Image (cartoon, rainbow, N blue to C red):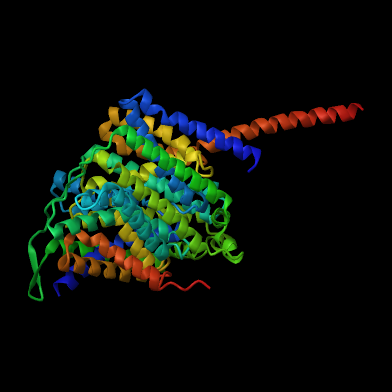
Amino acid sequence: MDIIIIGLLLGGTYALMAMGLQLQYGVARIMNLANGEILVCGAFGAIWFFTASKLSPIYAVLFVVPLAFAANWAIYQWMMLPLVKRAKNQGQLEVDSILATFGLSFFVIGILLAVFGGEFLTYSYLAQPVRIFGEPYALNRIAAFIGSAVLCAGLYAWLHWTRAGLTMRAVSVNPGAAGLVSINVTRASALAFALGGAVTAAGGVLLSMFLTFDASLGVAFTLKALIIVIMGGVNDVRGAIIASFILGLTETAVATLVDPGLTLAAAYILFIVILLVRPEGLFGRRAS
Amino acid sequence: MTAGEKRGLIVTAVIFLVAAMLPLVNQGYWLSIGVSIAMYTVLATSWTLFSGPTNYIALSTAAFFGIGMYLVAAFLDWAPFPVLVLMAVVVGAAFAAVIGLATLRISGVYFVIFTLGLTELVRQVVAWMQHVMGTSSGLYVLISMTDPILYWLLLALSAIVFAIGWWIGRSRLGFALRIIGNDEVVAEHSGINTARAKVYLFVISSAFAALTGALVAPRWSYVEPTIAFSPFLSFQVVIMALLGGVHRLWGPLLGVIPFTLLWELISANFPAQTTLVLGVAFLLIVYFIPHGVVGLFEDLMRNRHGRLDSIKGTLLRWRSGNA
């Protein structure tokens, strides 16, 4: 019971970063290996905000999100677009963007190290217990879950019930055809990339409420987000959410039953199972 | 063997012989740099064997390097060093085969993603195993291995890597890999077993990383998970190979030498900012010299030839016009 509830709470918070990556990879077609670093930036922003102002870290979302949006927009315009224009085909773009974002991830780690130093950073907020079914759970985990649920619901609604969201989904299905029906694919991709980064950073803010961060932690989160996106399918938000819960549950189970140091191994086991059983994802269609 | 190949072989042999003289000239600073260069040459060249022609970027060098190093450190009390080095090759190859079979059968980015976190995964598992078995996390590798011996070993190893790379380049396997790199669908339709070719090369390339890790373990002398499995190494190897150029066998070497020297300077002068500097260098290479030093050089040569040809053409036209 313990494992299930903590796992679901964790998974719910992961959903946000997975949706961020999904926007970047599914719509903008950029495999962003620096995604985890963006998340760590969000978390560090929240830590800095909380220690400086003593206000609830939830408010940190209000400045982290626009900042991350702007930064990711800039990254797309100045770093990714030249690669998109240079690439002769999708494969070339994939290789180039993987290399560029891989370099970017070390660049961001370097900046974080220079600004914040190499220590583990954390803060204590809402650390009192709450009873659910007679068992105590930390309030900050629940708050993070609720925050994530609200943002996910908002994003889902935006994707499904607005014109801009429809544009996103169209580009994600087929960029070529989207261009034919007078969608500005470049603009839509830039928007998706920026929004994806903003959502990921928001996920970092929420995760910082109950996890300890250091500058080099990004790669583990990149990997988790990638595994969720592969498991859930690149074009399906529901898939990503369900996959987040599966990952959260698996990680919590391994951490409680075996060893807390093995969370990444848990994620890898899931990854291998997906690759062997359903490489197209839970809701993905099998390529003919 | 054509005349050109023979000439290439002689030049390579001479270069290796000259390089082998280094310990006779200098035993201190320059030799230790020579060891680093030889080590990165093996790692970067064997990385390129797989990732160069296929375009599958492997980010897992450090994982295999660490496995080799750890095997030596952990079992030194039970087996002699040469046996452990052999074991590192076997274990590294077997591990790479399992990963390759799971991820390389499917085309796409799965492989890259899998290798991205592999170093961290192996580090976690090793730390956990040490925790369960109750051994301390730090291990000492106390065998006497002098720098000249290590240097010659690594130099011999890089000669082997070059020989294997040269052989693969001429073989059906190498041809198959180049087709896979150009278009995997075409490769499949022309009857190439793409998965098998990719797995073979990944195994070869990873076995060399494990072997290198095992060989240099005595130089580290103190090994623990965070040291052996540092993701930095994967990054350095990729950046060196890209800087040199991945479409020629000797390309990575042209990246390794300047980068190792530069790296010595950077880590001596800005020890706190190495990650940042490395990130910037990486981005500069990806954006401004996408085909590496070799690419730059070849463009230059082509331009010169092109200009000569156009001059010749003009001369010919002018002459025929007169006649």
In the rendered structure, the answer to whether residue B247 lies left or right of residue B139 reads right
Q: Quadrant of the N terminus of chain A?
A: bottom left
* Depth check, front residue: A203 or B240: B240
Visible residue check, residue A283: yes
Against B94, residue B1 (above or below) is above
Residue at 38% x, 39% y is B154
Residue at 39% x, 37% y is B38
In the rendered structure, the answer to whether residue B48 lies left or right of residue A274 reads right
* Depth check, front residue: A212 or B15: B15
Residue at 60% x, 38% y is B6
Visible residue check, residue B282: no
Residue A12's x, y, as percent? 25, 66
Q: Residue furthest right?
A: B323
Q: Residue furthest top?
A: B25
Residue A135's x, y, as percent? 8, 72
In the rendered structure, the answer to whether residue B219 lies left or right of residue B161 reads left
Against B317, residue A71 (above or below) is below
The part of the image, by quadrant, that contains residue B127 is bottom left
How many marks do you count on the picture? 0
In the rendered structure, the answer to whether residue B74 lies left or right of residue A26 reads left
Against B17, residue A104 (above or below) is below
Residue at 45% x, 36% y is B255
The part of the image, by quadrant, that contains residue B98 is bottom left
Residue A62's x, y, as percent? 26, 52
Residue B272's x, y, as percent? 25, 34
